[in-house]
């Protein structure tokens, strides 16, 4: 049931003094009749409708302290509660938890930050310009012709700090409670893939360091060109060095491949990034985790082939929303 504000209490009191029934006043303010009854009893006992003094410890901070804490953390969202305790002016004896409580009252809670690419002013300008240029593109007439491509690296074992273990108080170092992590995740494999509303490429294993020569001979010529046989096909790739090298651009020009201009530092604009996340989740959900690099590659290729094409179409259908989002964010990070 709603709680009456100080102004509503005064109005309710005036109606009671005017002889209006408690039930009618309760219906008017959408509160229970007992709320109005308690209000009338309090007024008769104290001559006021203000809140009664609360029991317990007095508030450790003043209104000025609360405002200082709130504004300090709004100006720098990565400050710790302990730093605000030390920076608070004047004599005080506050705990870190008191600062956290004041921040909670202001709707501010400590959460995991979003990890985004470093965007300079030039990056933001290019992203806005690209978004404006493609605002009028539709899935039916434009985006369905685009083949989105990318490389991704998958670790054999990934430790992101979110894994939990159920143990007793003194079992922190028990062998069955320790999460043994090999150095650098035990290595991994790099793969290349491309997606379109009508299909997908094979998942290509990229071994070793990728160069422009290898990119052309091992990926573009055998795997990308057959996908781009349609004269309306458009090829998307990011601005990695092998993708923008003179050898690569000349190869694409010689084979009359239409390349979609792409803004730097914009993985959030490429729907295939979400497909990599889904592919990783599918591999991690397997009952038998990959034991070596060969098993990992086989698992990736099997899961890649079983992802429903409808899921891929749904990702590509988000391109108009992505363009609007990057323009609205003035080139900054987007939710995608």
Image: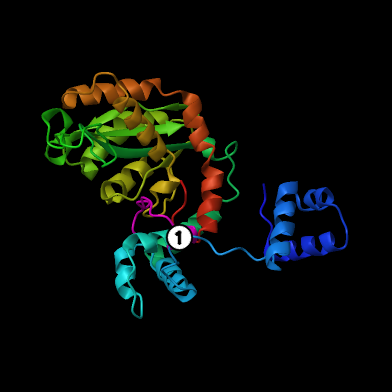
- Image coordinates of residue 72 in percent, x first then y, are 40, 71
- Image coordinates of residue 104 in percent, x first then y, are 45, 57
Magenta stretch mostly in which secondary structure?
loop
Q: Is residue 155 left or right of residue 50?
A: left
Image height of 131 relative to 7, above or below: above
Q: Tally the numbered discs.
A: 1
Towards the viewer: 84 or 20: 20
Residue 143 visible? The answer is yes
- At mark 1, the secondary structure is loop
The image quarter in which residue 285 lies: top left
Q: Is residue 103 left or right of residue 216?
A: right
- Image coordinates of residue 2 in percent, x first then y, are 67, 50
Report if residue 107 lies within the magenta region. yes
User: What segment is highlighted magenta in the picture?
Assistant: 102-119
Image height of 333 relative to 70, above or below: above
Image height of 126 relative to 221, above or below: below
Q: Dot 1 corresponds to which residue? A: 56
Residue furthest toward the right? 19
Residue 32 visible? The answer is no
User: Which residue is depicted at the point 47% across and 48% down?
Assistant: 335
Towards the viewer: 10 or 83: 10
- Image coordinates of residue 187 in percent, x first then y, are 16, 36
User: Which residue is depicted at the point 23% across and 23% down?
Assistant: 289
User: Which residue is depicted at the point 53% across and 35% down?
Assistant: 144
Report if residue 175 lies within the magenta region. no
The image quarter in which residue 207 lies: top left
User: Which residue is depicted at the point 25% across and 31% down?
Assistant: 166
């Amino acid at each position: 049931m709603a709680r009456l504000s100080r102004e509503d209490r005064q109005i309710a009191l005036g109606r009671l003094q005017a002889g209006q029934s408690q039930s009618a006043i309760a219906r008017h303010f959408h509160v229970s009749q007992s709320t109005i009854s308690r209000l009338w009893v309090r007024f008769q006992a104290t001559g006021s409708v203000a809140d009664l003094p609360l029991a317990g410890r007095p508030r450790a901070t003043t209104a000025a302290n609360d405002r200082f804490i709130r504004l300090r953390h709004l100006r720098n969202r990565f400050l710790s509660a302990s730093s605000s305790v030390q920076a608070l002016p004047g004599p005080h004896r506050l705990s870190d938890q008191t600062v956290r409580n004041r921040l909670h009252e202001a709707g501010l809670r400590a959460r995991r930050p979003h990890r985004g690419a470093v965007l300079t002013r030039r990056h933001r300008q290019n992203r806005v310009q690209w978004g404006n240029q493609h605002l009028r593109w539709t899935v039916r007439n434009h985006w369905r012709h685009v083949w989105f491509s990318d490389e991704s690296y998958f670790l054999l074992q990934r430790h992101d700090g979110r894994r939990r273990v159920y143990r007793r108080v003194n079992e922190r170092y028990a062998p069955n409670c320790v999460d043994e992590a090999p150095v650098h995740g035990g290595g991994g494999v790099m793969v290349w893939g491309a997606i379109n509303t009508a299909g997908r490429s094979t998942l290509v294993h990229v071994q070793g360091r990728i160069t422009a020569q290898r990119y052309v001979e091992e990926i573009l010529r055998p795997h990308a060109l057959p996908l781009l046989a349609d004269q309306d096909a458009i090829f998307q790739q990011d601005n990695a060095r092998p993708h923008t090298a003179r050898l690569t651009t000349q190869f694409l020009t010689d084979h009359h491949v239409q390349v979609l201009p792409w803004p730097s530092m914009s993985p959030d604009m490429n729907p295939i990034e979400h497909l990599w996340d889904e592919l990783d989740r599918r591999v991690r959900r397997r009952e038998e985790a990959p034991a070596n690099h060969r098993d990992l590659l086989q698992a990736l290729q099997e899961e890649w082939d079983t992802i429903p094409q409808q899921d891929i179409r749904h990702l590509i259908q988000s391109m108009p929303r992505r363009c609007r989002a990057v323009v609205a964010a003035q080139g900054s990070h987007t939710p995608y």
